[in-house]
Image (spheres, rainbow, N blue to C red):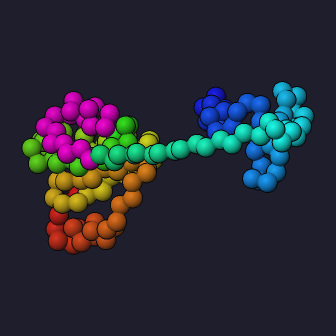
Amino acid sequence: MKIFENIKEFFFSADEEYGDQNDAPIRHDKMGDFDELPVGERRNKVVNIQTTAQLQVVLVKPEVFTDAKQIADHLISKKTVVLNLETASPENKRRIIDFLVGVAYANGGSLKPVANLTYIITPYNVGFIGEDLVGELENNGVII
């Protein structure tokens, strides 16, 4: 909960809270009592918030199960992963898929097949359009 307090302190000072532009600022003390600030003590606060979230896509082609840990680290850091399993053995394919589905699920993400032995793993904050693609792949004999 300390994070929320820090965010609140960033936008509002610990001493005062602002209402409408025409309202006098309100000061509250540690006990929760409120006073109106005199007109001379009013301060305007301008806060510029720039969000520069950069989404990244990581292409991976693991061959052994031990490569799955590095892929899991990408998923945990909210990166989209395109997983190509063409060079992995059948046993490693199953183990890698099982492990990464668990990592994606634990983080609120999902794993979708996009081609034969190729999957896309998205974090919770990335949407995926083309849900009918899975059915189309299965109808064309692609083993998922």
11 left or right of 94?
right
Task: Give x and y (percent) for residue 102.
Answer: 38, 42
Front residue of 54/118: it is: 54
Q: Is residue 76 above or below residue 116?
A: above
Task: Give x and y (percent) for residue 138.
Answer: 23, 67
Question: Range of the magenta residues?
Answer: 57-74
Q: Is residue 122 above or below residue 100?
A: below
Q: Residue at x 31, y 37 (%)?
A: 74
Q: Any magenta on residue 65?
A: yes
Seen as rendered, the residue at the extreme left is: 87
Q: Quadrant of residue 12?
A: top right
Q: Residue at x 9, y 44 (%)?
A: 87
Front residue of 74/47: it is: 47
Q: Is residue 2 above or below residue 23?
A: above
Quadrant of the rendering where the C terminus is positioned: bottom left
Task: Give x and y (percent) for residue 122.
Answer: 35, 50
Q: How many marks?
A: 0
Front residue of 99/132: it is: 132
Quadrant of the rendering where the N terminus is positioned: top right
Q: Residue at x 33, y 43 (%)?
A: 79
Residue 85 visible somewhere in the drawing: yes
Task: Give x and y (percent) for residue 40.
Answer: 81, 38
Q: Any magenta on residue 66?
A: yes
Q: Is residue 20 above or below residue 95?
A: below
Q: Residue at x 24, y 44 (%)?
A: 58
